[in-house]
């Protein structure tokens, strides 16, 4: 192996490590941020800051000003994938354990299959894919617990419903982005998406009264650190690694992060904030991850995950 091949291999390993660990850890970072910050304010500041930093970087590198068509496309995607989907994750983690939220998010491929099947001219699922839908649904049901708290091994019904709606929105956004291609730099379009989402989330925070009585001095150092981590690592570093891997790795290898992220989230939640792991959670994890595998084998539409 020559020096060039060795450097490429190191870069490949580092990029996979980033999307495996960083995106898996963002669920815990959100949980810590919520300790002293309201949900939509936390999410809004995160995406507006990350979007502004990324937009400034791509413009300095010579990217042209965005067109009206680009703004329209990214607004639709921002609402579906960041406001609705990521907003659902952040809101749900007020009462749901971060590791279990990550598990429910693995149901995104189930929604992609259903939505792609229901659209005009859609693709009919294979038997393997249909089995994956059934198995994954059983996994989600196992996680529902009406009496669950943050440290319990279950997710309250309302939070489960909100998360399922959020995953459906992410799947819809993924399908929309494949059917409505918009030209331009991927980094530019992503920065615009985060800017739009950040503005909408802050507007929602205002509508919910999250600014009332809020003061930066009331936010703990832990929550500020979690927010900085979400901006710099969860939204910029991991995204950059992912986009680079879309060119440097095969789709099959890249799709493995859908299996690793929830495991990382479960282990970090248990180790650092005392979230419980029980045999029921283990069985639900096996069912949900097995469902993703069955859908992959069935050559269903591309596996999408809510990118943290």
Image (cartoon, grey):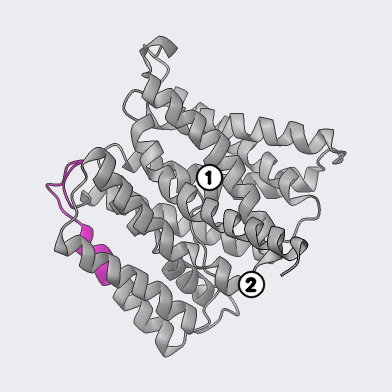
Q: Which mark is residue 193?
A: none
Q: In the image shown, does 83 or 242 lie closer to the viewer?
A: 242
Q: In the image shown, does 219 or 161 lie closer to the viewer?
A: 219
Which stretch appears magenta? Answer: 137-153
Q: Which image quadrant for residue 198?
A: top right
Q: Earlier in the sequence, mark 2 or mark 1?
A: 1
Image point (45%, 72%), residue name? 114
Q: In the image shown, does 87 or 305 lie closer to the viewer?
A: 305
Give the answer, above or below, for where 298 lies relative to 269: below
Q: Position of residue 269 (x, y in %)?
A: 29, 45
Q: Is residue 105 left or right of residue 195?
A: left
Q: Secondary structure at mark 1?
A: helix
Q: Which image quadrant for residue 71?
A: top right
Q: Position of residue 129 (x, y in %)?
A: 43, 82
Give the residue number, with chain letter if any, for mark 1: 82
Q: Which mark is residue 250?
A: 2
Image depth: mark 2 or mark 1 in front: 2
Quadrant occupied by the N terminus: bottom right
């Amino acid at each position: 192996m020559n020096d060039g091949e060795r450097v490429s291999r190191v870069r490949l390993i580092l990029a996979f490590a980033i999307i495996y660990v960083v995106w898996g850890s963002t669920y815990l970072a959100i949980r810590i941020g919520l300790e002293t910050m309201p949900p939509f304010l936390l999410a809004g500041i995160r995406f507006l800051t990350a979007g502004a930093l990324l937009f400034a970087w791509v413009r300095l590198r010579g990217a042209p000003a965005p067109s009206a068509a680009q703004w329209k496309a990214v607004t639709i995607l921002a609402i579906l994938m960041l406001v609705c989907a990521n907003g659902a994750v952040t809101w749900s983690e007020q009462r749901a354990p971060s590791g279990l939220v990550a598990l429910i998010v693995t149901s995104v491929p189930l929604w992609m299959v259903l939505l792609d099947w229901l659209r005009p001219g859609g693709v009919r699922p294979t038997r393997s894919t249909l089995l994956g839908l059934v198995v994954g649904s059983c996994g989600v049901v196992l996680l529902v617990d009406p009496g669950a708290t943050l440290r319990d091994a279950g997710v309250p019904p309302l939070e489960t419903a909100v998360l399922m709606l959020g995953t459906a929105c992410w799947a819809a956004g993924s399908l929309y982005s494949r059917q409505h291609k918009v030209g331009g730099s991927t980094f530019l379009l992503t920065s615009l998406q985060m800017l739009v989402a950040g503005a909408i989330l802050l507007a929602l925070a205002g509508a919910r009264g999250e600014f009332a009585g809020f003061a930066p001095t009331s936010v703990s150092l832990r929550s500020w650190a979690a927010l900085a981590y979400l901006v710099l690592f969860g939204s910029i570093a991991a995204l950059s690694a992912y986009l680079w891997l879309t060119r440097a790795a095969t789709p099959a290898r890249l799709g493995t992060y859908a299996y690793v992220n929830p495991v990382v989230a479960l282990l970090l939640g248990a180790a650092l904030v005392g979230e419980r792991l029980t045999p029921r959670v283990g069985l639900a994890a096996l069912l949900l991850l097995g469902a993703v595998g069955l859908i992959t084998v069935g050559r269903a539409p591309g596996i999408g995950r809510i990118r943290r």
